[in-house]
Structure formats: structure tokens, C-alpha cells
Amino acid sequence: MAADTFLGRPISPLTRRRIDNFRANRRGYGALWIFGVLFALSLVAELWANDKPLVVRHAGNWYVPIFATYPETTFGGIFKTEADYRSAEVQRLIEDEGDGWIVWPPVRYSYDTYKKDLPPGVGAPSPPTAFDNWLGTDDQARDVLARAIYGFRMSVLFALVLTALSAVVGVAAGAVQGYFGGWVDLVMQRFIEVWTSIPLLFTLIILASIVEPNVWWLLGIMLLFEWVAFVYIVRAEFLKVRNLDYVRAARALGVLDRHIMFRHILPNAMVSTLTYLPFVLTGAVTLLTSLDFLGFGLPPGSPSLGEMVGQGKENPQAPWLGLTAFTVLSVMLVLLVFVGEAVRDAFDPYKAVDA
Amino acid sequence: MTVTTTTAPVGTRTDAGDTGALLRVQNLVKHFPVRTGVLQRIAAWVKAVDDVSFEIRDGETFGLVGESGCGKTTVGRTILRLIEPTGGRVYFKGQDVFALRGQDLKRMRKDMQIIFQDPFSSLDPRMPIGTSIAEGLHVHGTKGAEADQIVRRVLGEVGLRPDHARRYPHEFSGGQRQRIGIARALALRPKLIVCDEPVSALDVSIQSQVLNLLNDLQKEYGLTYLFIAHNLSVVEHISNRVGVMYLGKLVEVAGREELYANPLHPYTKALISAIPMPDPTLKRDRIILPGDVPSPLNPPSGCRFHPRCPVAIGICSEQEPLLRNVGQDGAEHWVACHLVD
């Protein structure tokens, strides 16, 4: 019998069945692909939404401003600071005097590009225009599309890192509690109950008055509260599995506790954790968005969907703000939930594969 | 009538030292606490094993029988230190098992293994069976090609093919899985194997295969078995000596022939009368015990069997009978009953 493989690794028939089950859920499988493509595109957002050109040809030389920094003097300007390619003066220097040309990304704005050339009589937020700001600008004259793209990336990356870190901490804590039980379990359980009664929002407000908030601070503080989500399920799984005979057999063989925990019990306890992961991910996205909305999230200027929602609320006369944020958020969350449902179904031992 | 203490029932021995027995269980006690409330205060004790003593000699099979919940599994697990005892002593090859720590305990585990009842929960579903079998070898320092070779050999010994080592447990039947469990126990070449109802979960046709396999392995490697079962005919097939447990107490210990031919304790009599006979024309008097086994939370006073005993008298509910040897001419037959003399 030839061993079954997936992505070059040998897999058990059980894993094969789960993969088949996941694929059989067309909605979830499709959602994973769409989400994957969107996320991959957002990871290279600098290549297609940027206020610097991809390639510049000037006086017979090639320049790649998205990867390198060139002072304006390179193109014959007077400032020694980086060239502002969006300014008419720099464009004139490159195209007219240097006999060159500029290749722009499809979206000529980054998330922190301030549009300085709004037409007369139009203030920020400015409405969408066909060839420039496809989704308009926000109240600081920044391109909404660019901010949505970078905001999407920020949300997903933040949620992924937060979920991964809290899974590591939560699984380890739950494993220790469930495996050793008794007093260890009792003390940690009471600690978690007290800990979870601390409100995250107030902690953040207090901390914001003490420290300069940045992404890592925010990540750390949210991690302090998020890991708890995994403890209960992992603890329950460990409590169940530690009484199975194969764990007793391992103990009778003299296997060390930590090897029993991580070699025997954890792989068997991971199923419920894995099915839970996508929903923690969506929770993390929502949490970050709501904190940004309230102004206690990412530092000002960061690309943030929550901040965009807030701007939509402040500027009801500019519906493109709220609508964009709403659409990006709901598409992202719906895709993640579909993926999560498919993962859950794939690990469902009672679900038969539709042939 | 000779009245002795409740130490190990081996007739010829009087001193407390080494008797040549491989395993000596002395006054073993295991009480499980029942905890309630937020502070987990201990509200009561489940007296799973209460003052049990016996010996197992090198190379023999000691059968331990009793109803579900009588504590026989707890005895087996406590001997292996899978459960910490409440009291008593266990000597294995003259060594105090309960005093062992760290490396000494690990070394002892090499000599004592266990086979479980449920062949489905006793193997890690995510581990190829070869890895499961080799795990004990790795822990005790045998690695690489040498371990692989041992795995292949023990798989052959239990009647499986060496190339099965890479398969997962779900690819095997219950009987095959039980053989894998035996192979895992066997890989370390132990002296003693605790067989915790190894055939109760198997089809009758498979049961005899596994029992014969255990017999063959015993002859070949000089293994000693503590064979725990609730089925008296299975125990009769495999044991040299048999102990009968009721509610955490040993009520009778004797050689197999003696016990089956001449049961003395009323509980043993009832159990033996319940063994099905293959001859339907044979008429027997079945002893039907009234009621259920009482809760070990609050066991009956005196003889724990007295509420269900067909022959109980006044003293039975007042005084606990001691396990004493009533065997004739140096033979051993231990029984804990006021009515036997």
C-alpha cells in the first residue's frame, strides 16, 4: 500500500479524511482560497498601493524608489531629503528635464499619504473620483482605498500573531492544569477567574495614560487577556485524555510527564483547539477594530479599519468612509467564519465524506 | 484452628523477610477521597482497597477475581505505582516498591508492565504502533536499529507481522490491538506483567487465542502474571493460584484446583455456581445473591459480605473476619469467614 502524502509529507488516513472533508465543504474551501489570495495581495501592498513609483527612468539611469531612497538632488532638485514623487515639481524634473518616465503602482497612495492637491472648494473628506481616489479620502485627506488595504493587512497580521501567541500560552497553561489536576488546577483556575474579571478596556485606558502605546504594547496587553480563551478547552481535553489507558501505559513504561503531555496528550487534544482557532482569530480582529474605534488601539496614523469606522461615524456626510470599512470588515469576518466552519466540520468525527 | 494475622497468605512462611516470592503485597490500602465544595474539602473516602495481602511466586499466574468495583484493578495499578497507595507495602524482588524514587522507580518500571482491558483506549491513536512499542525502549536507553529490531521481534512473538510497525492502531481489530498491547509490555522483557482484564473486551473466540498467547509467552520467558478478571472460567484456565476479592477485601486465596473443587467462602461458592456449563442437561443449584454490591463509601460493618450472605449469623455483622489459613496438611487455603473452621 503506497503511503498517502499531502504537501510532500506522509499522512495518516484520518488526516486524509479530514482534508477531504474540508475540501468537500466548498464554501469553506473557496473562502480559504479567496482569503488567502486577498491576504497574499495585502502582504505585497507596497507594490500596488504606494506613494512612490515602482520604477523611475531618469537621465539614462534606472531607479526603484519603492526599495531605495533617493534624495531630490538625484533628479536635479534642490532638497537633500527624499524626493516627493507625487509633487508636480519632482515629476517635471524627472519627465521633462531628465527625459525619463515614471511607472506608478495602480493606487498612487500609501496609508499615510496626505493628498495636498485637493481641487478648489473640496475639503477632506473628499468624495470618490474615477481616476484618483477610487474610494475618496478620509478627514485627513488620505486615500481610503490605500488605508483599507493596509488596514486589512494590519488587522489580519495582528490577529494572527495574537492568536498564535495566545494559543501557545493558553495551551501550555491548560495542559499543565489538566494533566496535573488537583491543587495546581484549583489554584490556576481561581487565578484565571480573578484575572478574567479585569476589564481589558479599562486596563488599556489606564495604561495609555502611563506609556506611549504602540503595536507591541497593545499586542502584549491583549495577549494577557486572550490566552485564557484556550485554557478551558485544552484543560478539558487533558482531563479526559489523561485517564485513557495509553497514558497509563506510557507512565508504566516510565515516560516523563512532559513527554506524555506533549507527545501523547497534546496531539490528541489539538483537534478541539484547532477548530476553535479561526473563531479566536475573528474575535481578535473584532477586538482590535473596536479598540481602534474607541481610540485606545493602534497609535494615531496607523492604518486601521476601526479608526475608519470611527471617521464614518463622525462624518455622516461622507458615506464612503463607513461603507468601505463596513465592507472590508464584513467580507474578512465572513470569509474567516466560513473557513472556521469548514475546519470544524473537517474534524467532526461523525461527519461522513460525501463521495 | 490456626488464626494468623492478615499478612501474606503463604502457608509455609513465618518470617517477615524474603520468601522467594517475586511480589509480596502487605496490608495494601487505597482510599480515594471524595471532595466537595469550593475548598475541595474531603467529605468521605471510597475504600477501594482495604488491607489486602498476598504473594506471587516467580513464574506463576495469580488470578484476582471479583465483581466490578471490588478494587481488583486498583490493586494492580497501585502495585505499578500508577496510583499512589494510602498504606501498606509492596515488595518486588525484595525491594520496597513504594519507597522508590526517580531513577530507581524508572528501573523498576522496566521489570513490571501492564496490559489493559480496553484495546481501543490503550494505544495512542496518533502514533504508529511501532513507535508505541519502541517508546519504553527509548525511555530505558535502547535506541535506533537495536530498538527497531526488538520491535520487529516482539511483533512476531505476538503473532503480528514486523511490517505492521508503521501502521496506526485504527487499522487493527480488537484482538490484534490487544496483541499490540502485549507486545508493548513485552518489549522491555519484564518479570511481572499485570494483566488487567486483558480478554474481557474481546470476542470469545479471540479470548482463547489471547489467553493461549499469554500462556506461551509465560513458558518461553518465565513471566509472572497478576491476572485480574471478573470471569472465573478465564481465571481457571490460566491461573496457578486464585484470590477472590469482595468490596476491597480479599475473602479467599487458594490454589486453583483447591479453590474450584472446594470453595469455602459463601461469596466464592456463589461465584463458582454462576459459571456457565457447556452441558444443558446438567442441573445445578445456582446461588443467587440478593441485592447489589454495597457502596465502598460506607461498607457494611463486620464481614462486608454479610448483608448478601445466605448463611450469615449474628457475629458476621459485628466482627470482621480475618483471612486465615485453613488448609490441611501444609496446603494453603486462606479464607476470611466466621463460619469456616
Image: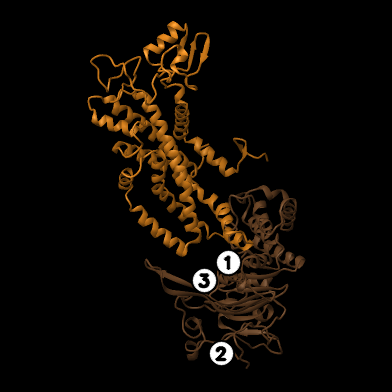
Chain colours: A orange, B brown
Residue A301's spot in the image, x, y percent? Answer: 35, 31
Q: Earlier in the sequence, mark 2 or mark 3?
A: 3
Q: Earlier in the sequence, mark 3 or mark 1?
A: 3
- The image quarter containing residue B12 is bottom right
Image point (74%, 50%), residue name: B145
Residue that label 2 marks: B339
Residue A247's spot in the image, x, y percent? Answer: 57, 59
Can residue B207 be seen by looking at this rendering?
yes
Residue that label 3 marks: B69
Residue A161's spot in the image, x, y percent? Answer: 45, 40
Mark 3: secondary structure: loop
Residue that label 1 marks: B82
Residue B99 is left or right of residue B142, and the answer is left
Residue A184 sits above or below residue A155 on the image: below
Amino acid type of the residue tagged 1 in the rendering: Leu
Residue B212 is left or right of residue A303, and the answer is right
Residue depth check, mark 2 versus mark 1: number of the one nearer the observer: 1
Amino acid type of the residue tagged 2 in the rendering: Leu
Q: Label 2 neighbourhood size at 10 Å, few (<14), some (14-19), many (20+)? A: some
Can residue B278 be seen by looking at this rendering?
no
Amino acid type of the residue tagged 3 in the rendering: Gly
Q: Return the chain for callout 2.
A: B
